[in-house]
Image (tube, coloured by chain):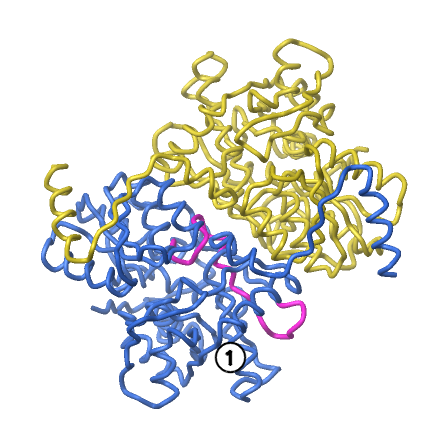
Chain colours: A yellow, B blue
């Protein structure tokens, strides 16, 4: 299902407020009640080191990922259509976000998580928000098929996965914010898991172009981890559809997905925008996470850092030039996955109070 | 040290941008270069259940706590005074924030953390950002004295704790944002650890009042955990100065501080604003964290939830009325402390894919 909207005499200068609902007139649907945590309006941070590179830091959303943008729209839609029970399969970020908005709306929620495959922070969030958590003995893709099945057979349960088009209507506001903050970049780089976000962002740009607000759409570039890259492989090999991956594997748990439900939309966004897709290794992802933190001061989870790993590879391969104006979508906060952070090299010493001054003085002198 | 500033013909309508540096003319100092991650501009979320209660969600800052507001000013100040090495004692949030901004500025940083007393997310952030971490065999207060000593004896090392007045100049922007978003509340409730924040926020309101922008200052109310409550006890008992706590203990690690360095400033803010201070138990804190998540959809760390626990107690004790317009400062993100989240009661089941539909159908039917 796709939702099409035609903006009428749209102008940024007329908008008020900030975040997702600033773009209310671009979000279809009637809402007597909006369930919001003031999501969106996230920082666009210019790189210190890389010229025209801008990081869109989605970790600053209320539950720490871009999922909140879609969830405010989807949960508002569920409430306005009088649903009482919602369900989502998740690698973790969708779960945390869905649980938060369901709690705020007073809805009952079931989360289907692949057992043992969810980063600690995300699982803990789902517990805190009081969701009923079903740990599925299987991958995310197995959990996802269960949601599809339940949705089709039990109409009473409202699905919160990104095949739900309202999710994408919220997520597209990333494009609106980018245009307001920096104009139209040459390219936008997006980590690709279940593959809704790259399409949603492209849709946002396209709507603005069709409304005459901007003159072109940026090239949409998808990044996948080597062990979970059905869409990137299809693009690289020039296939019409992806070969699904049965046992996806990567340290970037948020994009550990072998059968992306939105593959068709994602490939459309990439092709129509004359974009591209690329794979990066787990090692490249972890190095990119470290560089983002230690050079730029930005803490992003591994899946997010794949944007930067992808950018570097695209430079090396000549697909992007150093002068290109590029927006990198950092989809989630580093705090989502403490184990990944602790895997980076550490500089830790244990001291008694009376030793501290001597040690610091020694280190400061040595570094001069 | 205190910094005094007199605003000249200040008006919100003239300001541009968002976040801490929107209030540039209220932040003293000359900066050739500003080190920023677009901190501040956090959501003010209206309570679903409690009338005129508003949550200021500081967890949406780049490193997940209000500390980023002060750190952008303090690190910018360090850079503009040509310091190369910075140091901070921390229960965790200051560490994560200091490490991020030091990384962005290219400064060397030493963090002094009480060994075994720092929440997982915060320690992991400090590792990710590449700080040199000194685990001190002792409490936060012991680490804090070491910083004071190093600062006095080694002038070359720039201190990032909240006795550094530039930190407070950044933090006061919480008040500016509250006034822009909701006007002047009747009261502001602030968790109190090292006690700089309650003073900083009060200072912000006071500046706006002195500039004629607002007509009054809200009552400033400090909340401390029972096991670490020197300031609250002093206020309740009517003492002129606190009796320090040698071995502070509470589940809310961010405010596990027995000798708050800013006690004098905090007591001034509370007294001059006709405010109050209160203690809450660990159990009340954990219940408040759960309620915030499950009723409001907001994930805050335990120290933050003490604001809500304090609010409830102030209602019960008649210090606040239900109709009062109150801003609760939620200082840090729930993701900072995954262990605390996992301590809440869980609804988790492990299932094979073929069992899911039956279980959900059963639960949905039972709940009708």
Image quadrant where residue B148 sits: bottom left
Q: Residue at x 54, y 84 (%)?
A: B320
A100 relative to A66, above or below: below
Residue count near mark 1 (Cα–Cα under 10 Å), binned few <14, some 14–19, many ≥20: some
- Whether residue A345 sits left or right of residue A358 in the image: it is right
- Name the residue beneath numbered marker 1: B186
- Whether residue B312 sits left or right of residue B230 in the image: it is right
> Residue A257: where, in percent of width, then height?
65, 29
> Residue A198: where, in percent of width, then height?
63, 30
Q: Which residues are magenta?
A: B47-69
> Residue B110: where, in percent of width, then height?
24, 48
Q: Nearer the viewer, residue B43 or A294?
A: A294
> Residue B152: where, in percent of width, then height?
12, 60
Q: Residue at x 56, y 65 (%)?
A: B289
The C terminus of chain A appears in which quarter of the rendering? top left
Q: Nearer the viewer, residue B233 or B200?
A: B233
The N terminus of chain A appears in which quarter of the rendering? top right
B60 in the magenta segment: yes
Mark 1 — on which chain does it sit? B
> Mark 1: which secondary structure?
loop
Image quadrant where residue A4 sits: top right
Q: Residue at x 69, y 52 (%)?
A: B348
- Whether residue A22 sits left or right of residue B151 in the image: it is right
B322 relative to A152, above or below: below
Q: Nearer the viewer, residue B282 or B185?
A: B282
A295 in the magenta segment: no
Q: Nearer the viewer, residue B202 or A222?
A: A222
Q: Residue at x 68, y 34 (%)?
A: A140
């Amino acid at each position: 299902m796709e939702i099409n909207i035609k903006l009428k005499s749209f102008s940024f200068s007329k908008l008020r407020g900030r975040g997702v609902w600033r773009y209310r007139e671009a979000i279809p649907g009637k809402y007597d009640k909006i369930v919001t945590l003031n999501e969106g309006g996230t920082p666009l941070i210019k790189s210190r080191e890389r010229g025209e590179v801008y990081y869109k830091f989605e970790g600053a959303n209320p539950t720490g990922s871009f999922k909140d943008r879609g969830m405010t729209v989807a949960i508002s839609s569920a409430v306005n259509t009088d649903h009482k029970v919602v369900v989502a399969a998740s690698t973790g970020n969708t779960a945390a976000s869905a649980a938060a908005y369901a709690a705020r709306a007073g809805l009952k929620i079931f989360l289907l998580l692949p057992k043992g495959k969810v980063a600690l922070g995300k699982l803990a969030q789902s517990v805190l928000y009081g969701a009923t958590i079903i740990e599925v003995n299987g991958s995310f893709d197995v959990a996802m098929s269960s949601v599809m099945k339940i949705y089709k057979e039990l109409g009473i349960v409202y699905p919160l996965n990104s095949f739900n088009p309202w999710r994408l209507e919220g997520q597209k506001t990333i494009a609106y914010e980018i245009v307001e903050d920096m104009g139209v970049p040459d390219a936008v780089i997006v980590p690709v898991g279940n593959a809704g976000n790259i399409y949603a962002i492209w849709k946002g740009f396209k709507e603005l172009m069709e409304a005459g607000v901007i003159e072109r759409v940026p090239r949409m570039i998808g990044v996948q981890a080597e062990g979970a890259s059905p869409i990137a492989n299809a693009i690289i090999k020039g296939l019409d559809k992806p070969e699904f991956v049965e046992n996806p594997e990567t340290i970037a748990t948020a994009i550990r997905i072998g059968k992306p439900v939105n593959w068709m939309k994602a490939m459309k966004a990439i092709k129509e925008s004359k974009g591209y897709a690329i794979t990066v290794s787990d090692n490249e992802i972890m190095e990119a996470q470290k560089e983002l933190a230690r050079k730029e001061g930005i803490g992003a989870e591994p899946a997010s850092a794949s944007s930067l790993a992808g950018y570097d590879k695209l430079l090396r391969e000549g697909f992007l030039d150093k002068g290109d104006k590029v927006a990198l979508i950092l989809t989630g906060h580093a705090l989502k996955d403490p184990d990944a952070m602790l895997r980076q090299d550490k500089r830790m010493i244990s001291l008694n109070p009376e030793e501290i001054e001597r040690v610091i003085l020694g280190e400061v002198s040595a570094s001069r």
